[in-house]
Amino acid sequence: MEYVQERVTTLHEFTDPVPEAPTDRAAVVVPMTDREHASLAAERVLTALETVDPGRVVVALRAEGGRAGAVRDWLAAYDLPVEVVWCDGPRVAELLGEAGLDGPRGKGRDVWLALGVALAGDEEYVVVHDADTRSYGPHHVRRLLFPLARGYEFTKGYYARVENNRLYGRLFRLFYVPLVRALAERHDEPVLDYLGAFRYALAGEFAASRRLAAGLRVQRGWGLEVGTLGEAFGAAGFDGTAQVDLGVHEHDHRAVSGPSGLGDMSEEVGAALLRAVLDHGVAPAYDELTEAYRDAGRQLVRQYAADAAFNGLEYDRGGELEQIDRYAAAVREPGPDRRLPAWNDAPLDGDELLAAARADLANAER
């Protein structure tokens, strides 16, 4: 157990805390795919939320037309004030097209739509977390909200990814951390200190004040979490940010290769990270940065190997070095900025979106 503070306020799990928090004044956003419908993990999340008694739950549902009705009916069985945004619904798609916001789909786009519906209500806070966490408990929402009720504007969750006698969190350990370190060695900018302060920067769990949530520009895909940190730095900074220990965390693991594998994810995470540092005055020399990233990654592999051996864990040193080589291709200048606008500036209204989402769901097939 440790109690070290970072540049951002760090709240530790010393006593398995379930602190008092304003859950009744919070909207909880849960992105979900139809394949998670009725899964044990999703059922655990929703059952736990019933005991939390949030002001509202907004499910961002990505589903084919023939599946949306079944998910709607399944969600209705829970004792929760649920709004479902069918992110692939025809009226929602039409509304986005009319506003000039149609484009690539992805997790970030789904969360952005749900944020619009959440902000159409009167809740003071927004909590965002995934639906695939097998170790989810009521403490997640309460811990994420606790700092917000005490003057902070942004909270990030963190946890150790140790399962099946192995270290996980590979994209964070082997891509994000060495890339931020390589950047920090070459640029003395506060944004890099901020990005380096998070113990699990790619966690899907965060909470924000209504003001901050309404001002977030959102990455459309897998860059959601990193892009959110870049936006939070500008809006909340060190003093307005906290991170909280969410304890044990278990969820599905991805392969490195293949569609939606970690290799593909690194492309979007890298673009979002480098876009965030460009926003805050860092202009990397990309050719030099790629080799610096490799050097930092190799040093970290040596450290991870020692940590794994110390704890008697399995460790594939060669496989981790291969992943660093694969991720190095993502260290390049980000392409066009396709972020979705902050809801404060969006060319459509959250109430319009809510009406479209309700119409789509009412007409969804069973």
Image (cartoon, helix red, strand yellow):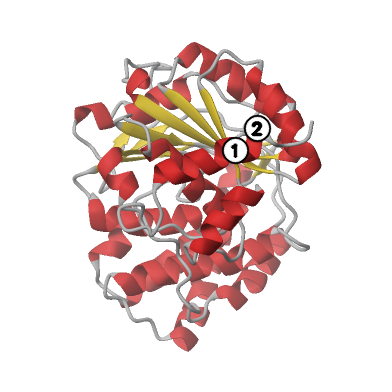
Judged from the image, the secondary structure of the residue bearing numbered disc 1 is helix
The x and y percentages for residue 293 are 50, 73
Q: Which quadrant would the N terminus be assigned to in this image?
A: top left
Image quadrant assignment for residue 259: bottom right
Judged from the image, the secondary structure of the residue bearing numbered disc 2 is helix
| Residue at x 54%, y 43% (from the top left corner) | 356
The x and y percentages for residue 225 are 47, 52
Amino acid type, mark 2: Ala
| Residue at x 26%, y 43% (from the top left corner) | 211
Residue that numbered label 2 is attached to: 362
Residue 41 falls left or right of residue 214:
right
Q: Is residue 172 visible?
A: no
Q: Which quadrant would the C terminus be assigned to in this image?
A: top right
* Neighbourhood count class around disc 1 (C-alpha, 10 Å): few under 14, some 14–19, many 20 upward: some
The x and y percentages for residue 216 are 35, 53
| Residue at x 65%, y 32% (from the top left corner) | 362
Residue that numbered label 1 is attached to: 359
Amino acid type, mark 1: Ala
Residue 255 falls left or right of residue 29:
right
Image quadrant assignment for residue 144: top left
- Residue 258 shows which numbered tag? none
Is the residue 183 above or below the residue 342 in the image? below
Q: Are marks 1 and 2 in contact (CB under 8 Å)?
A: yes
Image quadrant assignment for residue 208: top left
**Mark 1 vs mark 2, CA separation in Å:** 5 Å
